[in-house]
Image (cartoon, helix red, strand yellow):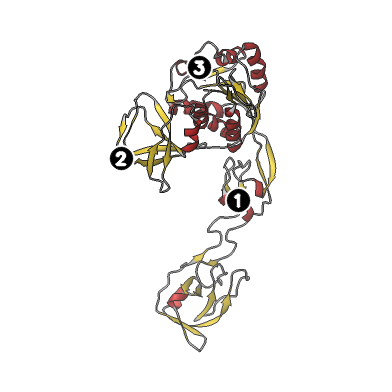
Amino acid sequence: MPEAKTRALTFDEARRIVIQTTRGLTRSPQTETVPLDQVHSRILAEDLRADRDYPALRRSLRDGFAVKASDVPGTLRVRGEVRAGQGEQRALAPGEAIEVMTGAPVPDTADAVVMVEYVTRNNKGEVSTEQRAEPGQFINARGAEAQLGSVLIARGTRLDASHIAALAMCGHSQVSVYAPPSVAILATGDELVEVSEQPKPHQIRNSNAHMLATLVAASGGRPTVLPVARDTKEALRPLLEQGLWHDMLLISGGVSAGKYDLVKPALKELGVEFQFERVRVQPGQPTAFGRYKSRPVFGLPGNPGSSLITYQLFARPALEILAGDANPILPLLWAKFEAPFRHKPGLTRFLPAILNEDGQRLRHVSWQGSSDVPALAQANVFLVADEDRESWEPGDLIRVMRKP
């Protein structure tokens, strides 16, 4: 690790170090029980196992007639009908068929379903078909979807709508999930004022703290915004100490190499062990990552664009791991440029862009750098310009990252 601390890493290297380091932290996530309708996007804290076979009986996959495959083609007596929700039926006699609806139980001796479109009825209570049937045709066997006790959702899964359906199917009105990690957010800088204040020309409102708090909550954390730290050691140190009591600490600003960039030295004095202090990305080169006991610590650059992108690349996976997510991922899409694009190689650049509603056509949003919040707000994705490529022509593919 010493080499990684002293050189600028690629964003892939830095992200890998964050994930590996955070996974190695000795921390036992707390759990809580939450009503089913409140667990979307939460992390499951225990395996969900099937409480019975699914389906619990053989059932039809089509509207049609349950038959013995050996009786068709031919003409069969219709014994009656069965709908979804009715109980199991007695066995079919030779030459019999029973009309079944989708989801209805299939009698034991029936081994196929002939679709209603392929039969002809007569006025004698019979149906005829010229179709052959294979054993098992259009029948969902008992336990075909899941068997009693099998794992349907593994612990550590972030719950989506399909998982909610599985939990409800198995009778879980309450669910054990991991409790949200506590994340302290500390913005630094003499230039910052509160959102409610009217800034003077040399001041800016503290937008980063609110942006990061929103990102933390969306990633499964519980944000705590600390007071702004002014650019003195005396103001900074007690707020850093306060932040280090939380499960994770995010600092915005004060991480470059200027005279008043005091965050990294102060964190080192407090015992933070840095894993890296620079990444070959733009915006966000001065991003730093370290650990304090069992807690991840991130120093993010102060401009909003830098904070947003470096949070998504590095802090988000760490928080997701702390929240119990087994496999944090960075979803990237591919899109085609609709106009030429160039950049200077050497850094991976994450630049604001607009992806057309068809999900294919991409155009770069002109911006004035990572402090340009209006351009960030206009974009709906970030294009990912690889560090070893200089230009793209119309129609060329490039990776894009969704805006969090």
> Which sits earlier in the primary sequence, circle 3 or circle 1?
1
The residue under label 2 is 394
Q: Label 2 crowding class (10 Å Cα cut-off): few <14, some 14-19, many 20+? A: some
The residue under label 3 is 256
Instruction: Determine whether the residue tagged by mark 3 lies in a helix, strand or loop.
Output: loop
Q: CA distance from mark 1 to mark 2?
A: 42 Å
Q: Label 3 crowding class (10 Å Cα cut-off): few <14, some 14-19, many 20+? A: many
Q: CA distance from mark 3 to mark 1?
A: 44 Å
Q: Is residue 395 above or below residue 98?
A: above
Instruction: Determine whether the residue tagged by mark 1 lies in a helix, strand or loop.
Output: helix
Front residue (pair 402, 191) = 191
**What amino acid is labelled 3 in the image?**
Ser
Q: Between label 1 and label 2, give the one nearer the viewer.
A: 2
Q: How many marks?
A: 3
Q: Is residue 132 above or below residue 32?
A: below
The residue under label 1 is 164
x then y, percent, for residue 31: 68, 38
Left or right, 167 with reference to 258: right
